[in-house]
Amino acid sequence: MARNSESPKRPRRGGPKSTPKIARGARKPLRPPAKRPSDAPTSGEKERKPPPLAKSQKLQKVLAQSGLGSRRAMEEMIKAGKVKVNEETATVGQRVTTEDLIQVGRRRIQFRVTTKLPRVILYHKPEGEIVSRDDPKERVSVFEKLPTIRNAKWLAIGRLDFNTCGLLIFTTSGELANRLMHPRFEVEREYAVRIYGTIKPDDMRKLCSGVRLSDGVARFDSIDPQGGEGRNHWYRVIVKEGRNRLVRRMFEALGLQVSRLMRVRFGVVSLPTTLRRGACAELKESEIRDLLDWVGTVPPVVSPYREPARKSPAASKKTKSSPARVSSQTKGKSG
């Protein structure tokens, strides 16, 4: 009996075996914003200097930048009377300076002006992880995979469902997170979607013109077929809002079943093809500057820092541990 001369094909090493081809395209992790002709300085015009550092900021913005939460959450905290400035109950919109003492419960936060850039990391979320620090079901959290930081807090820019994989962005800047997530900025989110069956032309028009959901009308900016095998077909969709389970609900409203969903781009940041599922990578300083320019926050930026906790004499004798490095490869389920 003659053997087959063709040897079985091995899966590519550049990505997981089940990663769709439309999510493995050659693309850069960050696309710098295109420069307008009017922005280029002429021969007689001097190069523009960065704006001076602000001497005061609104309280809710300072708290958000310190990593305590979103600006909206900080406003609710201030309204609840949980924030004090110089021993007096704070108000929403109150401005603070470097001379003011801010207290959130028992925690003290000192505001200072600095040119230090925020940190930004990309995480390739696999299916089976939750984007939350507190889960009653005690499921695996994406925050368990992130590097440890001091005097700051990782903020997730957008969420992904438990059964959705792909790109997640984390930052220490509440201002950056707000610029990328707030609906009024209409930042694009791009997904690779696998549908069981095919989408009729009429349904594709409905998805782009508007589908009525329980929380209002939603629409895709674009939907493009990407081929498929058997009953499964891939599509690439773009939306400009981040409502809960929005992509899945839009297809379900038309009786279509989503068998796989993967986010491949958020704004100008794309999922690197070399970033394995369950792993994270930190953006370089030049990439962070490009991202800040794109969202409209031109460095130098204003960032607060938390007052370091006082150590006991016994604890001060102990040797300091080295800061955790960004993990290049972490175990996880297939994305």
Image (cartoon, rainbow, N blue to C red):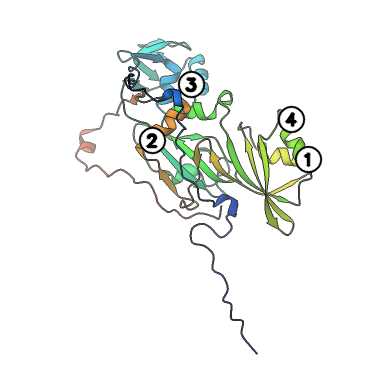
Query: Where residue 89 sits: x, y (%)?
Result: 43, 11
Q: Indicate the position of residue 160 as horizontal and vertical percent values.
A: 58, 40
Q: Which residue is mark 1?
A: 203
> Where does residue 236 sit, x and y in percent of width and height?
64, 44
* Residue occupying image coordinates x 46% and y 37%: 170
Mark seen at residue 74 = 3
Q: CA distance from mark 1 to mark 2?
A: 41 Å
First along the sequence among labels 2 and 4? 2
Mark 4 or mark 3: whose residue is earlier in sequence? 3
What is the three-letter code of the residue carrying label 3? Answer: Met
- Dot 2: element: loop
Determine which residue is flagged by label 4: 214
User: Gap in Å between the C-alphas at discs 3 and 1?
Assistant: 41 Å
Amino acid type, mark 1: Asp
Whether the residues at callouts 3 and 1 have beta carbons within 8 Å, the answer is: no
Work out whether 57 lies above or below 190. above
Q: Is residue 100 above or below residue 119?
A: above
Foreground tag (1 vs 4): 1
Pick the residue in front: 228 or 164. Answer: 228
